[in-house]
Image: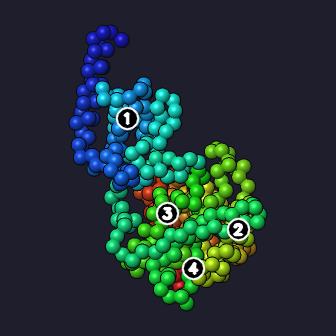
Amino acid sequence: MQLKQIFLFALAALAGTIVTAQDIKDDFKPSSLNQPGQQYPQVNSQGYARFRIFAPKADSVRVSLGLGGRGGTVLAKGADGYFTGTTEGPMDEGFHYYHITIDGGTFNDPGTLNYYGSTRWESGIEIPAHDQDFYALKDVEHGNVVQVLFPSKSTNTARRAFVYTPPGYSKDANRRYPVLYLQHGWGEDETAWSNQGHANLIMDNLIADGKAKPFIIVMTYGITNQLRFGHMREFKIDTFQTVLTEELIPYIDAHFRTLANRENRAMAGLSMGGMETHTITLNKPEVFSRYALLSGGVYSPGELKDKSKPGLIFISCGSRENPARVQQAADSLKQAGYNAVSFVSENTAHEFLTWRRSLYQLAPLLFQNK
């Protein structure tokens, strides 16, 4: 390439950078997930994220959050010892995990709260979604999320679950409720659905609007994270199936006012939790009557044949996952006589906004009178 061509190319690239920078609105505000009083990370109205990390002795700082798997966002060092940078483009709406790499070491951002994902506590950032109202904290009657420790003889441990009880649960000692067993994905744990997923707020708002029947939600650890990512097919369901069906369900039925029968019991899961749901509901069709896979595979009529017929099969994913497969699976199930529903979350991929929206669509369908 001649010197003149190199100069013109560099000038054009520089001009493109300037135009891009000018297009970013300077209306950045602290993320809603920041630690109290912390100003960074910040998000603007277009969905760009900006970071600021104090590391005066460091040579390089990179944020894992970025677009299209391009290695994240590189921060530039200032004379004051702060590294600052903005994502190269707007991020997807909703929740995102991220971490900071400083001179090759992995750290969490001290400015934000931490969430369990990728088998570790990661930093979290929220890009406001245009439809965030359905999981917003509103002035409505709220249910409770309580931690329970239940004995597990099969694993010789005391295991933990989080239980959502709907608004009004404590007021009527005679009322009993259906139960949804709701599973997290690989790398996460039993805190995910209430922390990252806002399952309790989604339910509170639906119940307040009269759109969903009140029910209990039970969230427990799926015993998945000892498996390395990329080796999911090696996962054995036996241990978790025993914990869930022989230990946790009897405990919940004994300690909460449940409708303790198949007709009033559902199982759902996101991603690997969907795979667990798929396997357990096929293995134990006498335990659950309603199934939901959220970015977690599909059912076929053949594998459901000669088993207790479920009252509902719900299958969902993001529009940037495999929506055709989800819709085709639901169509096949309908043609075979099953009550099957598909849902595709627009402009999302394998992420929590997909699963928040999925729960919002699923909940009103559960435990309805025939």
Residue under the image location 37 percent in, 35 percent down: 54
- Whether residues under marks 3 and 4 lie with C-beta atoms below 8 angstroms apart, the answer is no
Earlier-in-chain disc, 1 versus 3:
1
Q: Secondary structure at mark 1?
A: strand
> Which residue is more in the foreground, 310 or 66?
66
Mark nearer the viewer, 3 or 2: 2
The residue that disc 3 covers is: 194
Earlier-in-chain disc, 3 versus 2:
2
The residue that disc 1 covers is: 54
Residue under the image location 32 percent in, 9 percent down: 2
Kind of residue indicated by mark 2 = Pro
Place of residue 105 in the rendered image (x, y in percent of width and height, measured from the top left): 52, 32
Question: Residue 101, can we see it?
Answer: yes
Marks 1 and 2, Cα distance to the nearest angstrom?
45 Å
Mark 4 Cα-neighbour bin, 10 Å: few <14, some 14–19, many ≥20: many
Q: Quadrant of residue 63?
A: top left
The image shows residue 149, relative to residue 41, as above or below, that is below
Kind of residue indicated by mark 3 = Ser
Q: Secondary structure at mark 3?
A: helix
Place of residue 310 in the rendered image (x, y in percent of width and height, measured from the top left): 63, 75
Place of residue 204 in the rendered image (x, y in percent of width and height, measured from the top left): 42, 73
> Which residue is more in the foreground, 101 or 69?
101
Question: Residue 334, can we see it?
Answer: no
Residue 37 appears left or right of 213? left
The residue that disc 2 covers is: 151
Task: Spot the residue most to the top.
Answer: 2
> Which residue is more in the foreground, 368 or 175?
175
Q: Secondary structure at mark 4?
A: loop
Earlier-in-chain disc, 3 versus 4:
4
- The label shown at residue 178 is 4
Residue under the image location 66 percent in, 68 percent down: 150
